[in-house]
Image (tube, helix red, strand yellow):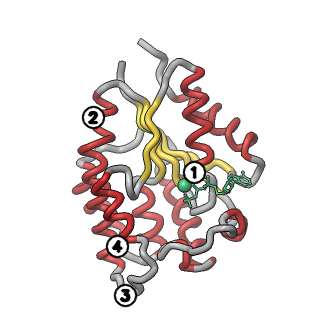
Amino acid sequence: MKGFFITLEGPDGGGKTTQAKLLLEFLEEQGRPGLHTVEPGGTEIGRAIRALVLNPRWRQMASRTELLLMAADRAQHVAEVIRPALAAGQVVVCERYVDSSLAYQGYGLGEDLRLIDQANELAAGGLLPDLTIVLDVEPATALARTACRTQRDRIEGRGLEFQARVREGYQKLCAAFPERMHLISAEGDVKAVHRRIAELVASRIPGRG
Ligand SMILES: Nc1ncnc2c1ncn2[C@@H]1O[C@H](COP(=O)(O)OP(=O)(O)OP(=O)(O)O)[C@@H](O)[C@H]1O
Ligand SMILES: [Mg+2]
């Protein structure tokens, strides 16, 4: 069986983790159990990189350093987790991937999008998702959903204007790659959002065998 690679994108607090879990349950019911993974931090090395790149202490971190640390996390993740799982025929559901680099370091921080494409190419070796779901939500709504978190990480703490640029970036990416990338409203309740995602995935994922 051929593997199938799904990525979930969107802001912090958009509901990626919530929806990834529901999608995995749905896939299991369909007889296609999958692997749930996340960037940054989908490997042991990646968790060390995550602790570094998201630490609010490093206020002086250059945007290009941030870009390269995310790429380093991705290179390890692709080599150690994603490619082997796809080769074994698994469905991989990954929170954040190449489009996060474009949305955050590109549209959010203003790094050159062509450089980010190159960093993504270096990290992922051309491995693109079969399907990318972008959870689209008002930045203020996403922020409110994570209000209970005691300390915001370095990227979460960038404020609503930054988050608005990231959102617009995702919208532009969806318009540019309509075959692979799909904008799904994440404004409604959890179940309604899940139904939209399940319908899209069911229409895209190849049958077994
Ligand atoms: N549709 C929704 N409506 C209301 N609350 C939601 C919805 N989806 C998720 N939440 C809640 O919002 C919070 C953040 O959701 P979740 O952790 O899934 O987001 P995330 O995108 O994975 O965030 P992060 O990027 O920070 O990991 C959780 O408390 C979750 O229960
Ligand atoms: Mg999450």
Which dot marks residue 66? 4
Contact flag, marks 1 and 4 (Cβ < 8 Å): no
Q: Quadrant of ligand 2?
A: bottom right
Residue drawn at 31 percent across, 60 percent down: 117
Distance, label 3 to label 1, CA atoms, is 28 Å
Is the shortest distance between ligand 2 and the CB of mark 2 under 8 Å?
A: no
Instruction: Read off the residue under disc 1.
Output: 16
Distance, label 3 to label 2, CA atoms, is 36 Å
- Mark sitting earlier along the chain (3/1): 1
Above/below status of 177 relative to 145 = above
- Mark sitting earlier along the chain (4/2): 4
Q: Secondary structure at mark 2?
A: helix
- Mark sitting earlier along the chain (3/2): 3
- Mark sitting earlier along the chain (1/4): 1
Residue 21: x percent and y percent?
Answer: 58, 40
Residue drawn at 56 percent across, 57 percent down: 10
Residue drawn at 37 percent across, 50 percent down: 42
Distance, label 1 to label 4, CA atoms, is 21 Å
Q: Residues within 10 Å of mark 4 (few under 14, many from 20)?
A: some
Q: Secondary structure at mark 1?
A: helix
Query: Which amino acid lies under the numbered mark 3 shown in the image of this protein?
Result: Gln
Report the side of 89 relative to 204 (left or right): left
Query: Which amino acid lies under the numbered mark 2 shown in the image of this protein?
Result: Pro
Which dot marks residue 84? 2
Residue 136: x percent and y percent?
Answer: 64, 56
Contact flag, marks 3 and 4 (Cβ < 8 Å): no
Q: Residues within 10 Å of mark 1 (few under 14, many from 20)?
A: many
Q: Which image quarter holds the C terminus?
A: top left
